[in-house]
Image: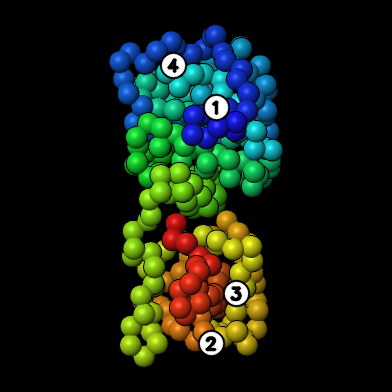
Amino acid sequence: MKSWENLEADENLILSTHMTKGRQGCKVDKIVLHHNGGNLTGRGCYDVWQTREASAHYQVAADGRITQLVWDTDTAWHAGDWNANLTSIGVEHADISADPWSISEATLDNGAHLVAALCKHFGLGRPQWRVNVFPHSDFTSTSCPASLAGSQNAAYMAKAQAYYDSMTGSHPATESSPTTTDAGKVNVVAGAYVVACDSLNVRSAPSTGATVVASYGRGQTVNLDHWGTVADGYIWGRYTAYSGAIRYIALAPADKSTWYLAKA
């Protein structure tokens, strides 16, 4: 993206067919997410939509390159619902695998950044799933946008929110920060958290001396329950692994000087 602030895409390949000029007086109030059902570039989408009665405003390629294909002030044919088309921005994402469908880290990162920039530009507020950011499947019978409404949704939305907070100078609700109570116990808000550091170890017990059983990388998500404690100089949360074992992960140093996990 040349400019997130001004919504200047890496390239403009503007369609003159299979879209509608203007929005019939309607305002943009949502963003609709799509996946290609394939690994297309911006040029690939442009070529396909010359003969296919469809279009979207943006394409995010596998390398993260963003192409604009319909101007934001015009109506793309993407949602399968005319009223939704008139009031939305359609964003397509390239897939890098088909079984199951998934998008690359670059696509996820820049797609989420684009959603944040669009929410800021159109005054939609902080990105929220099914509030101002919707799956294509909410408007027509389809499995689109595949992983963006499934396995990669939490990471995508967490990044969109983080980018929005950074772009607007706002901050998420304070409840996302665990609070310490007596006897070293901690109130942790249950739900999805996104790793905010390069690598974060998962241990068999809430201790730096416990066995490392797994690790998470930046941008990955982990779902914590309400339990928390302070031990070995860190605030710890926990989750139940697919095996049924309880696993422990550090949220921050006890002094809360930095956070390794951010509430999604």
Q: Which residue is mark 2?
A: 232
- SS at badge 4: loop
Q: Which residue is mark 1?
A: 8
Residue 138 located left or right of residue 206: left
Find residue 220 and report its horizontal and vertical position in percent: 58, 58
Find residue 70 and report its horizontal and vertical position in percent: 51, 18
What is the CA distance from the residue labelled 2 to the residue labelled 3? 15 Å
Q: Are marks 1 and 2 in contact (CB under 8 Å)?
A: no
Q: Which residue is mark 3?
A: 202
The quadrant of the image that shows the C terminus is bottom left
Q: Is residue 21 above or below residue 8?
A: above
Q: Is residue 117 visible?
A: yes
Q: What amino acid type should be assigned to the residue bearing mark 1?
A: Glu
Q: Nearer the viewer, mark 2 or mark 3?
A: 2
Q: Which image quarter: residue 146?
A: top right
Q: Nearer the viewer, mark 1 or mark 3?
A: 1
What is the CA distance from the residue labelled 4 to the residue labelled 2? 57 Å
What is the CA distance from the residue labelled 1 to the residue labelled 2? 48 Å
* Disc sitting over residue 74 in the figure: 4
Dot 4 crowding, Cα within 10 Å, few <14, some 14–19, many 20+: some
Q: Is residue 94 above or below residue 261?
A: above
What is the CA distance from the residue labelled 1 to the residue labelled 3? 40 Å
User: Who comes first in sequence, dot 1 or dot 4?
Assistant: 1
Residue 209 located left or right of residue 84: right
Q: Nearer the viewer, residue 209 or 39?
A: 209
User: Who comes first in sequence, dot 1 or dot 3?
Assistant: 1
Q: Nearer the viewer, residue 232 or 255?
A: 255
Q: Are marks 4 and 2 in contact (CB under 8 Å)?
A: no
- SS at badge 2: loop
What is the CA distance from the residue labelled 3 to the residue labelled 4? 48 Å
